[in-house]
Image: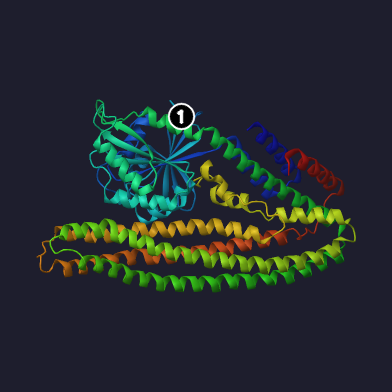
Amino acid sequence: MEIIKEKMNKVYKLAYKINEEQLIILSKFLNERIYNPDSFVVLLGETSSGKSSLLNGLMEENILYVSSAPSTGTIIEIIFKNDSNNNSYYAINKDATMEIIDFETFINLSKKQDENLNRLRLEVPAKNYNFNGLRLFDTPGYNSIVEEHDEILKEFLPNSDVIIYTVDYKIGIQEQDFIFLNFLKELLDDNINLVVVINRAPQGIINNTRINEIIKYAQDILNYTPKYFIVENINTEDYPMPKVDSLWKHIEYEIHSEGRKIRLEETLNDFIIELFYKCCSEINKRYQNLKLSIEQKEEIKKEIKEFEEKKEYAINLIDERFDKIINHSRKELIDIKSKLYNAVCSEIDSTAIAKKDETIEYINIHVLPFKVKEEISELQRYILIEVEDLNKELDDYINKEINKFNGKIQIIFSTFMEKSQIEAFKEAGKNILNQGLLQFFAKYGGDGKAGAGVANLASHLLKKVGNIFGKTFSKSTHNSLKHILAKIGATSTKAISSAVSVLVEAIAIAMEYASWKNKLKSKSKKAIEEWYKDANPSIIKDLNKLREENKNNFNEIFDDFINQYSYNAEIPNEKETMELLEESKKIAKEIGA
């Protein structure tokens, strides 16, 4: 990490010498990330599975409100600090503002979601473990998650380093756990560590049939065997304060592991290089401003204006393609309804009349979830193909226009630059098209932002673009596409819970053997309508969000490219500019840019 800090120090000083506002802001942000990297851990599980009790045990204090009843409580972010001796309480609002609150207000807000509240924040001393910089999120039970929570979870779960999933020993993995774990499987990358905590187990239990049953269920859903920890049901004098040293030592190990450090250093190094290229771009622009005549600058302005008109065509292309995708998706979702109903009816018709309860359970656990997953996977594939095809079309178009623009600019520059110098400036121009640091800052900069774990930090980094402008756009949109496709799968999985609840009611209804099949078909039709009612608007909303992200990514990269040729009216100091140019060449060699 010392080499990374040394590189950052060189670029940090260069940014301050350049004295450009955005470069200074980005330098401060990246410097803070390097010297104080965050870790990101999320606790999930059903209401009354003991999440808050686990955290109270970790903090050795009854801070978090504990209730076995479902509520609309908020998400709580806990930050551990080595330099803190007291607890501090904050409310983070939906507009990203943050306010200090007292303990009583903290408890009241944790019980009931305020309409303006995004989440609560609690800062506590890091006591028994090396948790400095750890950000731990306590979430409401899955059956208490309201739409606002759902959106927050979809955003920050993929950015976590570790997920802790709690299951009550006596209750085991139930219907809601099955749905939630499938929801997680859709959202999480392979590099995110998920552990299962089996809470409130009898004392002395290491392994038994119940433990094996819980882990087997989790394994079947996740397609791998998760690491698990058993927490004994021990009551202290007035409150259950579980102490599970093995779990917290595992978390401590994970967030400080060698592999994680290597991934962190590689990612931060790439961000430093990207920041350096942004510094070089500003220096190059000042040099050009010095050397270009007024007439040449006017000529460049004219070329930029003509080039900007090309953006409208690309934006229209994005809109047209997404209109097509959304219209197709609407029709597909209606078709999926019919396919689901036909699959359920086929199963009911092929079942012996004496197997009513078994049929309901089989449809509930197998037919509906698996058929929905199968059909939604086809829709996801269609969206993926269409968006990647759109990216290719945009790449081809914009590459052609960039090359034409560069050819005209090169003629103007040739009056005062050697060919090798023009090529060097062109290469710097391509490097500036990286948008990873800007996007990462936009999403996670500032006190009110949730932050991102190191394990997924690199997902916000765009690779060097080499000779092709379009690859930058493809990479940035691919990150958005990957995230939205996961959300579509997770949304559909979550919507199954609405359908399942309707079918569960059917078990309790007395049905005559002669008529149960028709009644079950009717109930199933209602259940499928519930699925459609939940899934359809959410999926269309996500597709429209992907449309806007595509347009925003394109606009940002396009505008950043043009900005390289937008010169200030005030001519820069020649001596300072030439010194910055020489210093940037020296730093490039020292940091391997």
Can residue 557 be seen in this snapshot? yes
Corner quadrant of residue 510: bottom left
Residue 373 or 410: which is nearer the viewer?
373
Can residue 529 be seen in this snapshot? no
Instruction: Using residue 432 as the reference point, say whether residue 146 is left or right of it.
Output: left
Instruction: Using residue 516 as the reference point, say whether residue 443 is left or right of it.
Output: right
Question: Which quadrant of the figure contains the C terminus?
Answer: top right
Residue at 56% of width from left, 58% of height from top?
A: 478
Residue 333 or 148: which is nearer the viewer?
333
Instruction: Using residue 282 as the reference point, say whether residue 268 is left or right of it.
Output: left
The crowd level at tag 1 (other Cα within 10 Å; few <14, some 14-19, many 20+) is many
Residue at 30% of width from left, 30% of height from top?
A: 241
Q: Position of residue 466 (x, y in %)?
A: 71, 54
Q: Position of residue 233 (x, y in %)?
A: 26, 31
On screen, residue 380 above or below 13: below
Corner quadrant of residue 52: top left
Going by the numbered disc 1, the residue's amino acid type is Ala
Q: Which SS class for mark 1?
A: loop
Q: Position of residue 108 (x, y in %)?
A: 33, 43
Q: Which residue is mark 1?
A: 126
Residue at 71% of width from left, 46% of height from top?
A: 276
Residue 258 or 567: which is nearer the viewer?
258
